[in-house]
Amino acid sequence: MYRYGSYWYYCYDNGWYRGRSPRGPFAYINYRSVPRAVHTVPPRYRRHWREFPGNGHAYGRDKQELRQIHRADRRMDRRMDRREERRVETREIRREEQRRRK
């Protein structure tokens, strides 16, 4: 599972899936929709979390620290999503105003 931007990408059975959260829900996407930085990760780099000691937690990080990091990431993702939504809305408003002027 890979995080890129505000989405999580998951490759399963030669298909790619994308979701807003690592917990899902995930939707099937076309291979062309997967960011290049994600689908070009070497296969030997990919691992399953169960291979890591401590039930999937990385070395040197305790659960509380990981929670804080993930919480901050989610906040930043929400901020970025709201900014993008405002940009899109502003563009749509401007286009509509231009159409009315013509």
Image: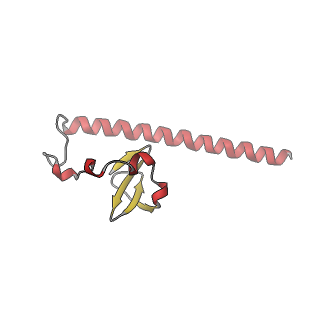
Vertical arrangement, residue 33 with respect to residue 52, above or below: below
From the top left corner, tell me how far across and down residue 22 is, in percent: 34, 51
Q: Residue at x 85, y 44 (%)?
A: 101
Residue sitting at the far left: 53
From the top left corner, tell me how far across and down residue 53 is, in percent: 13, 46
Q: Residue at x 23, y 51 (%)?
A: 47
- Image position of 52 (left or right of 89): left
Q: Residue at x 42, y 56 (%)?
A: 18
Residue situated in front as seen by the camera: 43 or 20: 43
Residue situated in front as seen by the camera: 5 or 93: 5
From the top left corner, tell me how far across and down residue 75 is, in percent: 41, 38
- Image position of 32 (left or right of 38): right
From the top left corner, tell me how far across and down residue 49 is, in percent: 21, 50
Vertical arrangement, residue 32 with respect to residue 60, above or below: below
Whether residue 51 is visible, yes or no, is yes
Coloring scheme of the render?
secondary structure
Residue sitting at the far right: 102
Whether residue 26 is visible, yes or no, is no
Looking at the rendered structure, the number of numbered marks drawn on it comes to 0
- Image position of 80 (left or right of 1): right
- Image position of 29 (left or right of 100): left
